[in-house]
Image: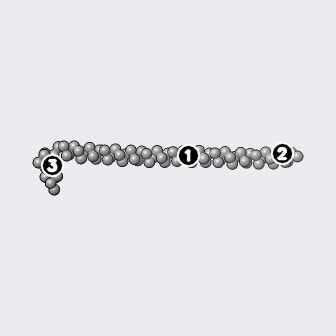
Amino acid sequence: MQENASDYESKDIRASFIVDKMILKWFLYRLIKDLHQQWYSIRLQIKLLALEAHLGLFREAKERSPPAERNEKLAA
């Protein structure tokens, strides 16, 4: 009888370990997924900032050029 009880306890411990392992894998999966989404968001923000800086430099150069050059550039 005690052998059966210890056998059930060992099976219970193994099942508990398997469930804990599955829960841990699920949490790690969610963490990695969230980090991955944040990484893409950060990359997108960097690209947008670079684009804004590029357009800002383009606008500044356009504003600095004399009106005669602007007309020539528009005509070309």
Kindly identify the residue that appears in the image at 61 percent across and 48 percent down: 25
Number of numbered callouts drawn? 3
Kindly identify the residue that appears in the image at 23 percent across and 44 percent down: 59
- What residue does disc 2 label? 5
* Label 1 or label 2, whichever comes before in sequence order: 2
Can you tell which quarter of the image residue 2 is in?
top right
Residue 24 image position (x, y, % from top left): 62, 45
Q: CA distance from mark 3 to mark 1?
A: 54 Å
Give me the disc on residue 70. 3
Q: Evaluate if marks 3 and 2 touch, with contact meaning CB atoms under 8 Å apart.
A: no
* Label 3 or label 2, whichever comes before in sequence order: 2
Tag nearer the camera, 3 or 2: 3
Q: CA distance from mark 3 to mark 2?
A: 91 Å
Residue 14 image position (x, y, % from top left): 73, 48
- What residue does disc 1 label? 30
Q: Secondary structure at mark 2?
A: helix
Q: Secondary structure at mark 1?
A: helix
Kindly identify the residue that appears in the image at 74 percent across and 45 percent down: 13
Q: Is residue 8 left or right of residue 30?
A: right
Crowd band around label 2 with a 10 angstrom C-alpha radius: few (<14), some (14–19), many (20+)? few
Closest to the observer, 21 or 40:
40
Q: CA distance from mark 1 to mark 2?
A: 37 Å
Crowd band around label 3 with a 10 angstrom C-alpha radius: few (<14), some (14–19), many (20+)? some
Q: Evaluate if marks 3 and 1 touch, with contact meaning CB atoms under 8 Å apart.
A: no
